Image (cartoon, rainbow, N blue to C red):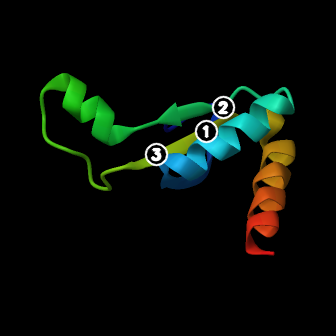
């Protein structure tokens, strides 16, 4: 997503991505999830570089709020 109005805020396994998506959506943020492995599979190619890993992107207008949510959830999980 080069030259885009979206910024990647997280890369990780599908379970954590799902947790972050739920938290972001609860805050009114609509994230975009990119899964290269699934995209490659659907196109008939092999797996991606990091099988099972996904990326979360948010619009630049929501970046500060989304980053805070990601940090809060990570802090909660580390406690």
State yes or no: discs 2 and 1 in contact (Cβ < 8 Å). Answer: yes
Query: Which label sits on residue 57?
Result: 1
* Residue depicted at x 53% and y 34%: 33
Residue on which the image places disc 3: 54
Count the marks.
Answer: 3
As displayed, is residue 14 above or below residue 45? below
Residue 56 shows in this picture: yes
Residue 60 shows in this picture: no
The answer to whether residue 57 is left or right of residue 41 is right
In depth, the one of 7 and 38 nearer the eye is: 38
As displayed, is residue 73 above or below residue 38? below
- Asked which quadrant contains residue 29, the reply is top right
Badge 3 element: strand
* Residue depicted at x 79% and y 44%: 66
* Residue depicted at x 19% and y 24%: 43
Query: Which label sits on residue 31?
Result: 2
């Amino acid at each position: 997503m080069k030259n885009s109005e979206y910024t990647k805020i997280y890369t990780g396994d599908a379970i954590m991505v799902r947790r972050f998506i739920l938290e972001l959506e609860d805050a009114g943020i609509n994230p975009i999830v990119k899964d290269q492995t699934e995209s490659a599979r659907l196109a008939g190619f092999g797996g991606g570089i990091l099988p099972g890993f996904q990326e979360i992107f948010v619009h630049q207008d929501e970046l500060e709020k989304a980053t805070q949510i990601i940090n809060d959830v990570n802090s909660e999980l580390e406690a």
